[in-house]
Amino acid sequence: MLEQFRKALHLNANNPPCTNVLRNTMGLPCAHVLKSLLDRNEKLTRNHFHAEWWLKRPGYAHQQVPNTHPPLFPETLSQLATQHEMLLPHQRRLLEGEVAMLSQDWSGGTSVLNPIVVRTRGRPQGAIAASSIRRDPSEFEIVEMQSARRKRKCRECDQEGHDRRTCPRLRVVQ
């Protein structure tokens, strides 16, 4: 999205027209959509994104509990305030963030967050350098490698094809 925003800042009339590829494949607004929003001074809303990117999606209805009790909002708010004072600073920031998100959801201005990055198992893709990937050798390369191998050489007679244990010269002597 940041890359599309940067492109939107530099779009002009000479750029090619929108093909809607990013919208159709990823469900994200392209630089052209972002440019038109910037020009009209409008905000980016969740409707500009495919529902797959939403935190609260249609069709995932939460179980609703019937309200049989009188409204408890003032009491709940006072309990929340007293508990807020007892929390550690980092817990306070988390709670304040959650309350801010709830208030945005109720005011109709839902925010779109970046997707959560999940670390997968194993070696990350791209961790192997391209130079370390080898192809299978062809038949003639296999033959060349086998012939290039050092053959056994006898220490007694300096001939190839046998070693000291199997040297025919030592057998004659014994």
Image (tube, rainbow, N blue to C red):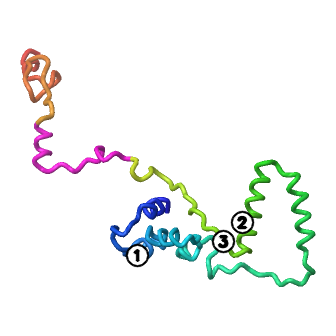
Q: Secondary structure at mark 1?
A: loop
**Residue 113 vs residue 134, the one in the foreground:** 113
Q: Secondary structure at mark 2?
A: helix
The amino acid beneath tag 3 is Thr
Q: On the picture, is 28 further left or further right than 136? A: right
Residue topped by disc 2 = 101
Direction top: furthest residue: 173
**Residue 82 vs residue 138, the one in the foreground:** 82
For residue 32, above or below residue 151? below
Chief secondary structure of the magenta portion: helix
Residue 105: horizontal and vertical position, in percent?
71, 72
Q: On the picture, is 15 further left or further right than 167? A: right
**Residue at 93%, 80% in the rendered image:** 70
Q: Quadrant of residue 21?
A: bottom left
Residue 110 numbered mark, or none:
3
For residue 108, above or below residue 5? below
Cα distance between the residues tagged 3 and 1: 24 Å
- Report crowding for label 2: few under 14, some 14 to 19, many 20 or more residues within 10 A (C-alpha): some
